[in-house]
Image (cartoon, coloured by chain):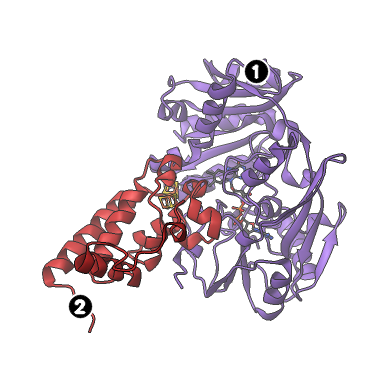
Amino acid sequence: MKEKPTKQEKIQANNLIEEVTEILGPCVKCGMCKSNCPVFKTIREESISPRGHSISLLNKKLEESLFDCTLCKSCERNCPLGIKICDSITKAREALSLKKKNTKQNEEMLKNLEETGNPFGNNPPKGEELFCC
Amino acid sequence: MNLLPYEYDASQIKGKAKQVIFPQSIGQVKSIVATSPKITIRGGGTGLSGGAVPNGDIVLDTSKLKKIGKLDQQRKTVEVEAGVILDDLEAFLEDYNLEFPVNPSSHTICTIGGMIATDAVGSRAIKYGATSKWARWIEVVDSKGNIGRKGATEMSDYTNMEGITGVIVKACLNLIPKQKRTASLIPVKDLDELLELTQKLKSHESISMVEMLDEFTSKGLGLEEKYHLIAEFEDNTGKMKDEKYTELLNLRDKVGPLLSREGYLMIEDPKLHHNKLKDFLTWLKIKKIPCFGHISVGIIHPRFKPNEEKLISEMMKVVKKLGGQVSGEHGIGILKKKFVDPQDKNIIINVKKRTDPENKFNSGKII
Ligand SMILES: Cc1cc2nc3c(=O)[nH]c(=O)nc-3n(C[C@H](O)[C@H](O)[C@H](O)COP(=O)(O)OP(=O)(O)OC[C@H]3O[C@@H](n4cnc5c(N)ncnc54)[C@H](O)[C@@H]3O)c2cc1C
Ligand code: SF4
Ligand code: SF4
């Protein structure tokens, strides 16, 4: 059975969500942050763009797609209002984690770390199977 | 699926989406249109009038129609799909020493389809005019899902119609050789000097942009609290070159969102004849309404706070009294519907009836 968040974790998650909406509060939805977002540039879907994250988070909708962000901060460089979009995404991910809504991959990684000390477990992929942007 | 991001554009209006579809080819657009009852067309979602905000219907997002096709270097033309982002096109053309000259401040994110649909203007209007002037032909999917190529004479049924008449899927654009540009930032002492200098700059042989910033906007950008002009030249006339030039233009692109941060979330885009600008700018100054804009072509961007609806209506009356247009470049969308002249509205209704009798596209927009 899936683990449930404790009362304390729920409070912590809600506090984080409050912080997220505070960070994103000044967002005017201009979309300038999309300019160099590598994820948007590749997938071309607004929901995984920084403006998409901002709109969803401002509406307190925490989606698994938050984990699609590379945390590269390119959006922050292009936001004319200097909004810390990346910080808000990191906090929102933390809130998801506290609510026990981690992605399957994250759960697996945590389990591997606990059991073997290696995020890939006992059968890490070969060098050439790993890739990085 | 998370539909929230598709229920907004840059206008601050929120709509309701039933579904969002991302066609990856023109063939897919045809079948989606043929089988869907009501469609809102979305490009980059940078519109400032709510044109891409859905009304409970299906959102057709053109972002994945991103192919840059045939480039004819001799004739200086390029064929592009509607979802190509303007700056991606410019990056592609750079290798061939060519460029597309129309430059709205949203150039890093707006799509060619959205630019044609709104007939985007931008800061180089004095030299290059609006987007439609640069389209050789466009291909449009009609409400039955059929595709047709529209040349110069038929194009006006689709350009500046904000998607209410059909989906623009492809265009052939005229290009120019890549220009080397410089710019100057000029502080001026008052409105008289601002307008006089604007006229002088407009007749300079290498001018490609004259933009104005009012005192409030200048201060917000860290400049002296005075009116300023930004003049761009297609030679070495400007004082700011290379990086300094790029810095100045980047600053210019950020003016709109920066004023939004100050609470001025609403942006208008009236267009006035040069000899009416003094009256208009004086009125804005008396009413303490911040503004900036493409002064070379009379397009001014006054900014308002969300509770200033009455002041916007008052301003529109002033614009009409001075013989101006209520929207010079951002389109009507949802926000400016109530300001459309009844005669213009009838013309638009007739085009709509002829091109989209079932009212499939962008219902509730413009008319
Ligand atoms: C910071 C900022 C600066 C801006 N500066 C300028 C400027 O200088 N000059 C200017 O003119 N505008 C400016 N705009 C407004 C906006 O960027 C332009 O109107 C732009 O052309 C819209 O392009 P888009 O792809 O984002 O279209 P969207 O916002 O997605 O759509 C705009 C309208 O066009 C329709 N549409 C979109 N694609 C298609 C298609 N393929 N077929 C049919 N209809 C379609 C939509 O339904 C909607 O009605 C600015 C906006 C922002 C946020
Ligand atoms: S650039 Fe900044 S203000 Fe504009 S949509 Fe992105 S986060 Fe919001
Ligand atoms: S930090 Fe995330 S949202 Fe921002 S540009 Fe990078 S990938 Fe995109």
Tell how many labels. Answer: 2
Q: Is residue B326 visible?
A: no
- Looking at the picture, tell me which residue is in the foreground, B166 or B273: B166
Question: Color used for chain A?
Answer: red
Chain the render paints purple: B
Give the residue at mark 2.
A3
Q: Residues within 10 Å of mark 2 (few under 14, many from 20)?
A: few
Identify which residue is drawn at 42% across, 57% down. Answer: A127
Within the image, what quadrant is residue B117 found in?
bottom right
Within the image, what quadrant is residue A76 found in?
top left
x and y, in percent, of residue A44 in the image = 55, 59
For the residues carrying marks 2 and 1, which lies nearer the camera in this image? 2
Q: CA distance from mark 2 to mark 1?
A: 72 Å
Image quarter of the N terminus of chain A? bottom left
Instruction: Give the chain letter at badge 1.
Output: B
Give the residue at mark 1.
B196
Q: Vertical placement of B54 versus B138: above or below?
A: below
Query: Left of A129 or right of it: where is B196?
Result: right
- Tell me the amino acid under the disc marked 2: Glu
Same chain for the residues at labels 2 and 1, yes or no? no
Q: Residues within 10 Å of mark 1 (few under 14, many from 20)?
A: few
- The furthest residue to the left: A8
